[in-house]
Image: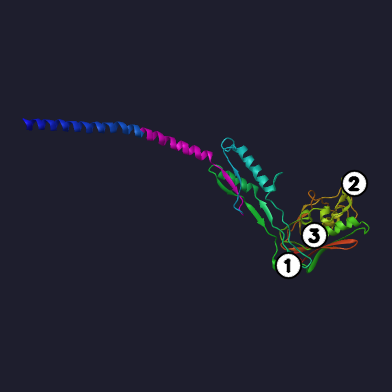
Amino acid sequence: MKKKWMTTLCIICTIGLVGCQVKSADEKKQEQPIQESEQKAEDLKKPVAIEQQQTESVVVEIVDPSTKAIIQTIAPKEMGYERDKQSYTKQIEQLAKELARGNEKAAGYDKRMILDKLDDQGKLMKGSPLIVLKESELVERILEASATGGKVEMPLYITESGYYFEDIPYLENVVVASYTTYFNTDDVGRNKNIELSAKAINNVIVGSGDYFSFNTVVGPRDEANGYQPAPEIINKKVVMGIGGGICQTSSTLFNAVDQIPVKFVERHHHSLDVGYVPKGRDATVSYGGLDFRFHNTSDVPFLIKANYSKNSLTVEVRTAEKFVEILKKS
């Protein structure tokens, strides 16, 4: 009897344990769908969140190629890249223009070439190269990066003066063009201005393909640089002004270089006739305004010599013997 009772008890316990195990499995089955559905909901949220984060964080960084510094950062979406690409493109074009040419707050990356020259001892004084920021190319690069973001290097093109160092000792050998103008020895202030501007253009090396700018070479005409008050022509009137007389230097230079194959980029006439050159053969200048510029379109370099005396100014164009025939104007 006792053995039978024990057997019955074991069977009951076993059934109870099985029941517990089944219940535990059922509970797990009920919990699993809840966890899976919650996980799926989270997974569905993730792509949206990631996509939104990527859209909001798209920026284009404009980089200076020489320093690798980030000079400006733009957010295409905020500037309307997705809404109005035409308007966005115009904004980028304006940005490229300001970066190249500058604005009221900052100078641009474009720089005129400052030509090399020789000092009084014949030692080379280095200038600086021509620097051009290609605006259309920068715009194209920014537009390409606007969808995904990234770094964009500015397309800066640097051009050194077009001559070889070994040719320098020979550039003074042959005079291929010359022009002389005269002035009144009594005009002390005016004559001093001619002397200073002549000294500034003397011994300047103009390489093949180089651009010469009178205002860039001579610089500011003010009292700090020794220039004096003298008569000058402004709006068909003769008035006193600091630096009056330097137009004789620029006009003498024009008549000299006009004898060789160069292309004139900028030249202006006085509003009144001047007596030191024939009518229409002048080249008036004013610092920060009118300039006299030319492009050496020959394949060879030449040297500008400016010889000042008490009543005359002579500008010569000189070059090496081997370049003479090329510099003769056809």
Instruction: Report the residue at 65% width, 50% height from top.
Output: 134
- The residue that disc 2 covers is 237
Q: Indicate the secondary structure of the residue bearing disc 1.
A: helix
Classify mark 3: residues with Cα within 10 Å, few (<14), some (14-19) or many (20+).
Answer: many
Q: Amino acid at mark 3?
A: Ile
Residue lying farthest to the left in this orientation: 1
Instruction: Report the residue at 9% width, 30% height from top.
Output: 5
Q: On the image, which quarter does residue 17 sit in?
A: top left
Magenta-colored segment: predominant secondary structure? helix
Which of the marked residues, 1 or 2, is nearer the chain's N terminus?
A: 1
User: Do the residues under discs 1 and 2 have CB atoms within 8 angstroms?
Assistant: no
Q: Is residue 320 left or right of residue 281?
A: left
Instruction: Report the residue at 66% width, 42% height from top.
Output: 94
The alpha-carbon separation of the residues under discs 2 and 3 comes to: 28 Å
- The residue that disc 1 covers is 168
Q: Quadrant of the N terminus?
A: top left
Nearest the viewer among 41 and 261 is 41
Classify mark 2: residues with Cα within 10 Å, few (<14), some (14-19) or many (20+).
Answer: few
Q: Is residue 20 left or right of residue 173?
A: left
Instruction: Report the residue at 62% width, 40% height from top.
Output: 89
Q: Which residues are magenta?
A: 37-66
The magenta stretch spans residue 314: no
- The residue that disc 3 covers is 201
Q: Amino acid at mark 2?
A: Lys
Nearest the viewer among 286 and 17 is 17
Which of the marked residues, 1 or 3, is nearer the chain's N terminus?
A: 1
